Image (cartoon, rainbow, N blue to C red):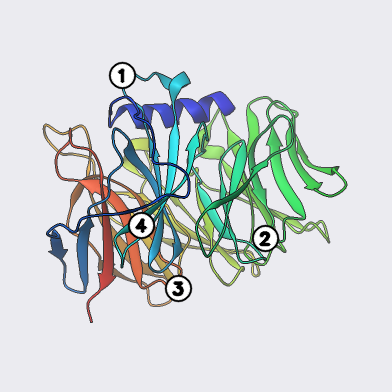
Amino acid sequence: MKKICYLLVFLILFASMGCKALTPQKQGEEKKISPEKPVIFTTEHFITEKIEFTSPNFKHWYLRWFDDKTIAVIMHNQSIENPPVELIQRVYAYDLENKKQTFIFEGKFPFDFNVRLKKLANGDFLLQGSVMALEIESQTFKLKRIFHYPDGAYAADVSRCQEQILYIKEEDGLYLRTIASSKDIKLYSVEDERIRPAMPQWSDDEKTINYLLVNIGSYSENKFVFLNPITGKQSSFKVNHAYLGWWFQDNKRFVTATPGASFGFVPKIKVIDISSNQVLEFQPTDEVEILCPPHGDEILFEQKDLDVPGSKFPLSKLMILNVLTNTTEIVTPEFLNLSSSVFSPSGNKIAFLANFISEKDLSIYITKRKE
């Protein structure tokens, strides 16, 4: 399963090739970016602005939000000249108001598909990779420490109080460890090599554990499992080729999506209500992908048109589905290779990566609702 996840990540990387790395800006150094004329796009209710942020010979990979004015920019140096074994990541904090970037980290810091940046109980941030995490100070955005997962772990989620960690061991199963004592509880044991746990995560209130059971023999049989670690109560839901899922802020609902035509299915957004054991389904048009947690009752998703003549990438636009009113809004015009879309903590802004030319590097865009 580990090899499959890494292979898919590298395939994504080769889609946007770059150059060899140069010496990075020193850790803790802050750089003022010269303002450039913004590129602005509008839809009926939203306005989108291109953000000018670069780091020599590194390409944008993922975006996350520290707060409503500061984004985490995760970059990589992947290119034909730099094969996968030489893959290096850089992490920056970028202040959108002051156009200021702060270097946080450079090194081998692999990610799975679910890149998590969470605010810890002490107010700092934890950026979680697949084998380790970075604890980042909330005031200075400087690297505080590197949090190493247990030996053999390749996907994990650390609790906000940093007392427990969910993690997966390849060929073995899913574990819950009390960090202070290194005491493990095995939550899922791999007995059939075709069925593997993936993407373990806590609900925001950390009362429920969630993970994906990947059926390698039949991805249409993939299931999300929900477990109360105190009572042992457990439920599961089949999700048809879904590989990502996200908690709502109420800790009662969970959203995932069946992508659609490329997998031979009708595209569907599924909202699983854990409290009532019910599933609501919404059917968008075209291909669909959800890459971030909902905000309130709103789900942000990418709607993709796969049939684009002469392009390696689909035409994609961002949409918002309100599950309470069952209404959708168009957020952005269509882009090529749109990815890494994510709500800000307040829900008032959206960050994403995209471009208009297949061969061009991805750029950062920030969207907000018109006043």
How crowded pointer 4 is (Cα within 10 Å; few <14, some 14-19, many 20+) is rated as many
Reading the image, the residue beneath label 2 is 160
Q: Earlier in the sequence, mark 4 or mark 2?
A: 2
The residue lying toward the viewer, choosing from 22 and 300, is 22
Q: Identify residue type, mark 1.
A: Ile
| Total number of numbered discs in the rendering | 4
The answer to the question of whether label 1 and label 2 lie on touching residues, with beta carbons closer than 8 A, is no
Residue 297 marker? 3
Q: CA distance from mark 4 to mark 3?
A: 13 Å
The reply to whether the C-beta atoms of the residues labelled 3 and 1 are less than 8 Å apart is no
Residue 256 pos. (x, y %): 48, 54
Q: Which residue is mark 4?
A: 301
Q: Nearer the viewer, mark 3 or mark 1?
A: 1
Identified at 26% across, 56% down, the residue is 365
Dot 1 or dot 4: first in sequence order is 1
Confirm whether residue 192 shows in the render. yes
Which residue appears at 77% of the width and 55% of the height? 163
Say what secondary structure mark 2 lies in: loop
> Could you tell me the amino acid type at mark 4?
Phe
Q: Mark 1 or mark 4, which is nearer to you?
A: 1
Q: Is residue 253 above or below residue 190?
A: below
Q: Helix, strand, or loop for circle 1?
A: loop
* 10 Å crowding of disc 2: few (<14), some (14-19), many (20+): many
Distance (Cα) linking label 2 and label 3:
24 Å
Which residue in the structure is indicated by mark 1?
80
Left or right: 123 as drawn, with respect to 304: right
Residue 146, how many percent across, how many down?
A: 63, 43
